[in-house]
Image: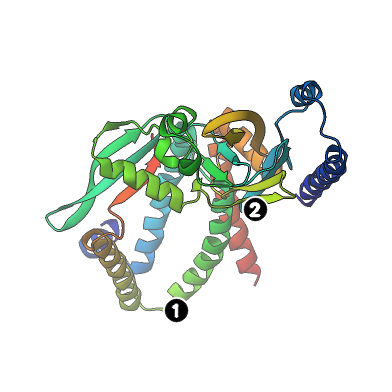
Amino acid sequence: MLVPAMIYLLGMPTSVVIGTSLFQVVFVSANVTLLQAVQVGSVDIVLTLLLLAGGVVGAQFGAQMGTKLRGEETRALLGMLVLSVALGLLYDLVRTPENLFAIGPVP
Amino acid sequence: MILAAARGLAVLLALAGAAHAQAPAALPTPPAPAAAAAAAASTPQLTADLSTDRVEITTGFTGSSVMVFGATERLIGPESGDDVVVVAWGPPQATVVRRKVNVLGFWINGPSAVFRDVPGFYAIAATRPVWEVLPEDTRRASRLGLEALPLRASGSQAPAFRAALLDLRQHDGRWQEYAAPVTVAGGRLFSARVSFPDTVQTGAYRIEVLLVRERRIVARQELYIDVERVGTAASIAYVARTAPLVYGVVCILLAALAGWLGSVMFRRN
C-alpha cells in the first residue's frame, strides 16, 4: 500500500519509491527478527544465511536492471508481481484444502 | 553411524555364536528338573541392546535409525508361541489439531482440539501384530499399538480430531506402527530397526523390548537413547536459548554484513 501511495499520491519517481520502501522494510524486519528471537526463539539462522545468499545477489542484479528500465516499465512489472502474489494467496484461501485437518505444536 | 552399525553387527554375531554353541550341548542329555529350574533362574528370558546409545543431530541431519537386537532363552515363533515386541517412545509433545471450515467461500481455521499428553515419537514393531498376541486390557495398560494410546483431547471432542492426529502423525513418520519388521534369525536372535525422521525432537527416548507368551508379557527390558544436537547446531541452539537478545542482534548484524558485502563485491565488478 505504501508503494502506490508514494507513486500516485506523493508523485515520487518509481526508482526512489522502491528504494524508500525497502529502506523502511529494513527497520521493520530487523525489529521483527529481534522480537521473534527474544520472545519465540524461532529464528533459523542457517536457513536465513541460505536465503541471504540468494537475496543479496538478486538485489544487486535487480538494482542494475532498475537503472535500465523506464519508470512505467518498472511500475508495470511491480504491479504484475503484486497481483500474481495476491491471486496466489486468494486461490489458496478459496480452493478446497486436500486435508481439512492440520496439526501443530501447542503455543 | 557406520561404527555403530558395525558394533551392533559384532554383538549380534557373538550372540549367534553363543546360541549355536549352547544348542548341541543341551540336546543329548536332558538335564534334571532342578538343574533346568536353576538354569532358567540364572539365564534371563530376554536380553536386548541397541546399536548406539545416542542419535546426533547435525545441521545436515536427514533422519537416522537405530538397531534394537537381542536374544531370547526359548525359540521365537508360532510353534513356541513366543513373540517379541519392540516399542520406542519419544518425549511427550502437546499437539493441537485444527480443522478448516468454509466461511463465505474462504477456508479458515475453525474448531481445534488440544492433545496434551501424547508422545512426540512412537514406534512399535513386533514379530506378530500385538492385537493378535495380547488381550485389549494388557495392550491398554502398556500402551501397545496406536489404538491403545490414551489420546485425550481438550477442546473439540469429535472423534475425527483423534483420527486426524493418528493419520497426520503417521504420515510425517513420527508415529509408526509395524513400519519395520522384527526379524528373527536362528529362532532366538531378533533385530528391529527404529527409524527417526528428520523432524525428530531432542530428548531422552525409551525403547521397551517385551517378550510375549500365552497372551501375557513374561519379560521386559527397557533401553534408553539420547537424541541430541551436536557441533554447530548445538552451539547455535545453546546461544539462542541462553542469550536470545544477543542471538537476535547477531542475526541482524549478519544480514547487514551480507548486504554490505554484496554491494562492495558488485561495485568492483
Circle 2 Cα neighbour tier, 10 Å, few/some/many (<14 / 14–19 / ≥20): few
Q: Which residue is mark 1?
A: A68
Name, please, the residue furthest toward the left.
B104
Residue drawn at x 78%, y 26% is B36
Q: Position of residue B54 (x, y in %)?
A: 70, 38
Q: Position of residue A45 (x, y in %)?
A: 57, 47
Inter-mark Cα distance, 1 to 2: 41 Å
Image height of B37 relative to A16, above or below: above
Quarter of the image where the C terminus of chain B is located? bottom right
The answer to which image quadrant residue A35 occupies is: top left
Q: Amino acid at mark 2?
A: Gly
**Does B29 sit left or right of B202 as displayed?**
right
Give me the chain letter of mark 1.
Answer: A
> SS of the residue at dot 1?
helix
Circle 1 Cα neighbour tier, 10 Å, few/some/many (<14 / 14–19 / ≥20): few
Which mark is on residue B60?
2
Residue drawn at x 44%, y 79% is A68
